[in-house]
Image: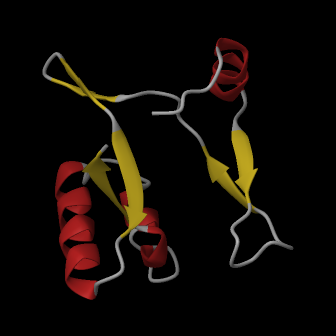
Amino acid sequence: MAKFDAETLGELRDVREVAIRTDKHPKSAVVIWVVVATLEFAGHRLGVQAFTASDAASIERASHEFLRKYQASPYAQSIVRAEILPTTLRLEPR
């Protein structure tokens, strides 16, 4: 598995936003928020890879669970707006 060097990771931890370009849209960059971390839970570390959740049922399940889990947050509803839903990701172990 390829890894970033320590200097790059340090810069990514401190920067608030980064931009990505895809092969599909090489002339336009999209700003994203970045978090430099391994998925950690219950004392475990898990390397994951993110994939677009492309089917409506997966997006609906993710949105429902997101609202259930973060219902107290004033930002929860903004994450499940129709124009945001296509950015839903599925994490799979590497």
29 versus 41 height, above or below: below
Q: Quadrant of residue 85?
A: bottom left
61 versus 32 height, above or below: below
Q: Quadrant of residue 66?
A: bottom left
* Picture residue at 45% right of the left edge, 83% below the top: 82
| Nearer-the-camera pick, 2 or 73 | 2
Q: Position of residue 93 (x, y in %)?
A: 26, 45
Q: Position of residue 33 (x, y in %)?
A: 61, 46
Q: How many marks?
A: 0
71 versus 16 height, above or below: below
Q: Position of residue 72 (x, y in %)?
A: 27, 48
* Picture residue at 55% right of the left edge, 27% below the top: 3
Residue 63 appears left or right of 68: right
Residue 14 appears left or right of 56: right
Color encoding of the figure: secondary structure
* Picture residue at 44% right of the left edge, 54% below the top: 75
82 versus 18 height, above or below: below
Q: Position of residue 5 (x, y in %)?
A: 65, 19
> Can you say which quadrant of the picture contains the N terminus?
top left
Residue 4 appears left or right of 59: right
| Nearer-the-camera pick, 39 or 94 | 94
> Can you say which quadrant of the picture contains the C terminus?
top left
Q: Residue furthest front?
A: 1
* Picture residue at 48% right of the left edge, 69% below the top: 87
Q: Residue furthest left?
A: 42
